[in-house]
Image: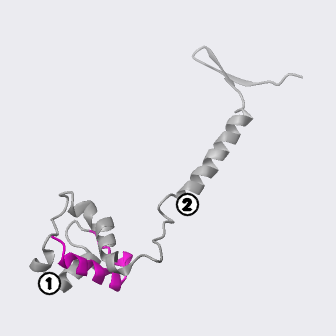
Amino acid sequence: MKKEHKEDIVSDIKIEHNKVPKLLVAVFYVVAIWAIGYAIFMPGKLAVEPAAAPQDNKGEIIFEGTCLNCHATGAAPDLSGVTDRMPEEDIKNVIKKGRNTMPAIGHLYTEKEIDLVYEYLKDYR
């Protein structure tokens, strides 16, 4: 027995309505499941800093990984000698709460880590 296909005529053109091949449906579901998994577990989201990272250079690590993205490219002011120009509490407040185009990043770091960044900035030239 032959399957019948639905068809329409549009502008004298016969248009058939065939079923989507099962392979194409299977590929769609595989890609959809992969996309959902990737969105949940995307690279970088689960990255964890090593627990044994030395504390003596943690301020430098945070500074180079976070601050220099803007402050070394000209998108934000150069931070060389910033501790000579601004009081310690003002610098820490800018880190925590942001200012002008700088976003607040205090929620990303502990007080101790912010202190380490400030200590690193004292020698940053």
Which quadrant of the structure image shows residue 73? bottom left
Predominant secondary structure in magenta?
A: helix
Give the labeled residue for mark 1. Answer: 87
Q: Which residues are magenta?
A: 103-125
Which quadrant of the structure image shows residue 62? bottom left
Q: Amino acid at mark 2?
A: Phe
Q: Quick one: 9 or 18, which is closer to the camera?
A: 18
Residue 41's label in the rendered image is 2
Which quadrant of the structure image shows residue 57? bottom left
Image position of 33 (left or right of 95): right
Q: Amino acid at mark 1?
A: Pro
Please tell me which of labels 1 and 2 falls first in the chain: 2
> Residue at left 22%, top 65%?
101
> Residue at left 24%, top 61%?
70
Residue 115's label in the rendered image is none
Q: Is residue 106 magenta?
A: yes
Q: Is residue 22 above or below residue 30?
A: above
Image position of 123 (left or right of 114): left
